[in-house]
Structures are given as structure tokens and as C-alpha cells.
Image: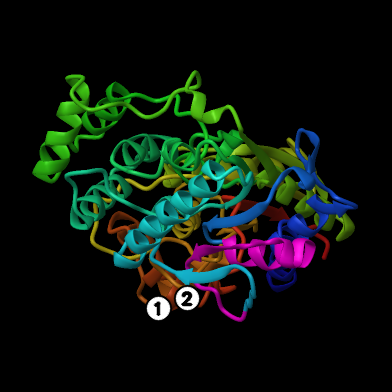
């Protein structure tokens, strides 16, 4: 019975991915009608008269930017004068007008800095055209991972400074909004500074959101939108997460300068550089959850979409899903069998051990440990937590499956789930028991999905 439930969970997850494929979202959301560009987005419809522009450039940043670029080329063709997109792996994607380059995630590398410098060169070209009386439209394709992939340290910082600061933030349990508050204050291209670089060009950002609530100034560290955070906010994050004394000296010095008013803050909503900049959400986690719900119901499960804003420590959130599984099994609440409970968002992991894993694998392992601790081994739930980008932490897995009978299997192999959890070594555990879900890079990124299934007991 568990094998059939696993197949259902995998199918539900893959259907959710299909619903947020960048090529489909761009193809459906961006339409050329006569001389106008129509942008169908979460907030409605935007119409752009292309006759008002002499040049059209494209800049992409994020894990989905290659697929988004290829889809945009199908719509606009030779109307595109040039540009580039930086992603983790361009794979088999081919573009003729938009150059595709690769860089590193979640930690930036030299290629990330090269991309950041090239973005400023592109902006200089666009400003030069504008100065010559040749209006320029810039389409910026933004998706998750952009903070690392297109990176340029603020004056006075090195790549090593940025890498070490990012590494510290990743291991501190900081939420994505907290991380990006710090990162954009240490960047020459984030926190609205990319829009500043392109001003006075018209800049339209087409976004695949990997942030709960679709906060524009958090997605990819908000390169083209006003920044609502301050130096004080950045300093508060570093101190609250216990990182201040562990920062590279130059980072601590620069943040201190910002706190003292000796460094300018990021551009704010009243800055004129945003007068001709707009942003549009084409896809997000909620859209993926809607597709997952359709598939679950088609497979005979009653379905509850719990939230698209799940956040918190992964191992603690797992306890909520375990509790839900027990209540469904014993009391028929909040749903009766067969049922599916869905959630999406982005959890965090506070690293204390030396193992290897990711937030989704950590959540799945904690789910197992919780079931055993609560002596709920008769509930027979199936839990899947996985990242929509196909990459959970620094591993080749998207996430992992967890179910009651897996505990006995692990014990028979001499594995202690609690020990693996304490060492943040969820990858090694699920590798040993063979319960990873591996999709490879999916080309999209809209946070994570959690799928809890309880099949009909009579099956």
C-alpha cells in the first residue's frame, strides 16, 4: 500500500512542477499583439506599446532564467537587441538573442561577480542609448537564486567576504527575508541598485517568485524595486543571529559605516529611479499548490491546502505534519481518509552538526523521528517534502519520502534516525534507506512543497 501512496505523492509533486514551468508561465503570460506587448500577471494585465521604444534588452537572473529567456525569445524574436541571463545550469536550453551564462548557488563565485559586472555594462549601454534619444525597454527576468547568481560586492568588499557572510547566514537559521536584508546592503546591484543603474530606461521585471507572500524586495534581493529595509535592519539580523563577531572584518566595518550614516542606504520608494520601473509576478508557490490539489483530487483524495506561507525551523514544522497525520488516522480531523494535506513555503535549518542535507530532507527525517517518539507507527502516513528547484541544500536530491515502516527498515540496518537528525545528516540517512526524490534541476523555483497522504485503510 505504501508503494502506491508513494507513486501518488510523486505524481502530485510532478504535477505541481508542471504548473510552474517557466516556459509555460512566460508563454501564457507574455503575448505579442500587433505592436503591443501584453503582460498577463497575478494583478491583471499590462499593455506596453513597443512603438515607443527603439531598443529592447533582456537581463535574466535566477534558476529559471534560461527557460524564461528561451520562452521570451519565442514571443519577441528579433525585436530583442541583446542581453544575457545567468543561471545555475543552462542544460539543453538554447537562445539566439539572449546569451546564457552559468554561475554558482547558494554561494556566489567568480562567475557570479562577472555576471554582476556585465549587468552594469549592459546598463551603461542602455543609458547611452537613452542619452542619444533612443528610448530603451529593459525586460528583467527574475527567479529564485538570483541573489547568488548575479552578485557584485559593494565597494570595499571581496568575493570571499560575500561568500563567508552568506555561508554564516545559511547556517544560522535566518529566514530568506533576513538573509536578503543583509545581502542587498552588501551589494552593488541588489536592493534596487540595478534599477538605479538602468535609470532612466523603462524597466519591467517579470518574476517567478520563490518568496512567501511574493515580497518584491526580497525575491532575488529585490534588484529592481525599492528597498524597505535599512542598515539598522541588516545590523539587527546579524546581531540577533549571533553572527556579528564572526563576520569578516571588512563586512563588519562596512555595516558599521552604514549604521553610522557614513554609507548611503539602498534606494527607497521615493527615489526617482523607480519612476519607470514596474514588476509583475508570473508564477508562485500558491500556483504550484493549486496544481498539486487538482492532481490529488483526481487521484481520489480529499484535499486541504493548508498554507503557502510555511516558515520556521524544519524539524519543528515536521512535528505539525506528524500531529496532523495522527489526528487524521485516529479522529478523522481535519479530513478523513483518503486525504491529502498540502503546504508550501520555505523552512530553515539551524546547523549544529557536521552532516549533509537540506531543509526538506531535515523535515522528512524529523517527521520520522516524531512518529516514533509519539508511538504512532500504526498511522501509516506518507510525507514528502521537496524543493521545486530540484535541489535541496548542497545535494543532488530535491527532498525525501518518510513513512512509518521506514523506521523499522532503518533500525534493521543499524541506523539511528535521531543521531542523523542531531548531526544535520539527513542526506546520508535517506541515501542509505533509498528514499530520496531526485528530479535533477527543474528549471523552476517557487519555494518548497509538503505533501501528506493517508490512503484508505481498506486498500
Q: Is 73 covered by the magenta stretch?
A: yes
Q: Is residue 338 visible?
A: no
Residue 409 lies, with reference to residue 365, above or below; the image says below
| Residue bearing the label numbered 1 | 413
Can you give x and y, in whole percent of width and height, for residue 294 in the image?
Answer: 84, 52
Would you identify the image quadrant in which residue 328 lies? top right
Of badges 1 and 2, nearer the viewer stands 2
> Magenta segment, which residues?
64-92
- In depth, the one of 108 and 12 nearer the eye is 108
Q: What element carries label 1?
A: loop
Image marks 1 and 2: residues in contact by CB distance under 8 Å: yes
| Quadrant for the C terminus in the image | bottom right
278 with respect to 221 (left or right): right
The percent position of residue 407, horizontal first and vertical second, equals 49, 65
Colour pattern: rainbow
Question: 216 or 382: nearer the eye?
Answer: 216
Amino acid at each position: 500500500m505504501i508503494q502506491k501512496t508513494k507513486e501518488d505523492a510523486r505524481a502530485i509533486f510532478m504535477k505541481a512542477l508542471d504548473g510552474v514551468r517557466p516556459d509555460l508561465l512566460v508563454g501564457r503570460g507574455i503575448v505579442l499583439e500587433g505592436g503591443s506587448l501584453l503582460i498577463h500577471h497575478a494583478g491583471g494585465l499590462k499593455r506596453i506599446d513597443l512603438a515607443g521604444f527603439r531598443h529592447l534588452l533582456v537581463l535574466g537572473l535566477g534558476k529559471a532564467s534560461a527557460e524564461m529567456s528561451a520562452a521570451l525569445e519565442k514571443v519577441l524574436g528579433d525585436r530583442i537587441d541583446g542581453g544575457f541571463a545567468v543561471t545555475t545550469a543552462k542544460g539543453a536550453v538554447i537562445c539566439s538573442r539572449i546569451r546564457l551564462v552559468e554561475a554558482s548557488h547558494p554561494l556566489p563565485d567568480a562567475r557570479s561577480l562577472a555576471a554582476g559586472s556585465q549587468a552594469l555594462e549592459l546598463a551603461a549601454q542602455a543609458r547611452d542609448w537613452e542619452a542619444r534619444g533612443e528610448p530603451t525597454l529593459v525586460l528583467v527576468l527574475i527567479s529564485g537564486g538570483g541573489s547568488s547568481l548575479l552578485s557584485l560586492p559593494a565597494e570595499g568588499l571581496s568575493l570571499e567576504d560575500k561568500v563567508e557572510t552568506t555561508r554564516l547566514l545559511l547556517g544560522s537559521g535566518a529566514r530568506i527575508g533576513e538573509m536578503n536584508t543583509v545581502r542587498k546592503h552588501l551589494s552593488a546591484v541588489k536592493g534596487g541598485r540595478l534599477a538605479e543603474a538602468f535609470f532612466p530606461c523603462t524597466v519591467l521585471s517579470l518574476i517567478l517568485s520563490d518568496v512567501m507572500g511574493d515580497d518584491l524586495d526580497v525575491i532575488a534581493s529585490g534588484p529592481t524595486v525599492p528597498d524597505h529595509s535599512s542598515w539598522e535592519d541588516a545590523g539587527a539580523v546579524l546581531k540577533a543571529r549571533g553572527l556579528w563577531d564572526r563576520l569578516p572584518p571588512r563586512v563588519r566595518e562596512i555595516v558599521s559605516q552604514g549604521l553610522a550614516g557614513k554609507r548611503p542606504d539602498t534606494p527607497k520608494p521615493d527615489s526617482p529611479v523607480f519612476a519607470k520601473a514596474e514588476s509583475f509576478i508570473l508564477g508562485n508557490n500558491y500556483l504550484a499548490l493549486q496544481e498539486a490539489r487538482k492532481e490529488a483530487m483526481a487521484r481520489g483524495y480529499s484535499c486541504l491546502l493548508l498554507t503557502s506561507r510555511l516558515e520556521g525551523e524544519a524539524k519543528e514544522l515536521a512535528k505539525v505534519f506528524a500531529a496532523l497525520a495522527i489526528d487524521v488516522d485516529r479522529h478523522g480531523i481535519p479530513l478523513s481518509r483518503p486525504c491529502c494535506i498540502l503546504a508550501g513555503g520555505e523552512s530553515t535549518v539551524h546547523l549544529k552538526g557536521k552532516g549533509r542535507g537540506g531543509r526538506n530532507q531535515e523535515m522528512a527525517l524529523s517527521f520520522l523521528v516524531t512518529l516514533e517518539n509519539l508511538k504512532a507507527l500504526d498511522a501509516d502516513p506518507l510525507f514528502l517534502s521537496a524543493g521545486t528547484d530540484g535541489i535541496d541544500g548542497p545535494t543532488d536530491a530535491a527532498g525525501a519520502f518518510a513513512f512509518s515502516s521506514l523506521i523499522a527498515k532503518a533500525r534493521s540496518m543499524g541506523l539511528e534516525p535521531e543521531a542523523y537528525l542531531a548531526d544535520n545528516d539527513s542526506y546520508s540517512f535517506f541515501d542509505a534507506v533509498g528514499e530520496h526524490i531526485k528530479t535533477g534541476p527543474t528549471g523552476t523555483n517557487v519555494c518548497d512543497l509538503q505533501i501528506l497522504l493517508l490512503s484508505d485503510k481498506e486498500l
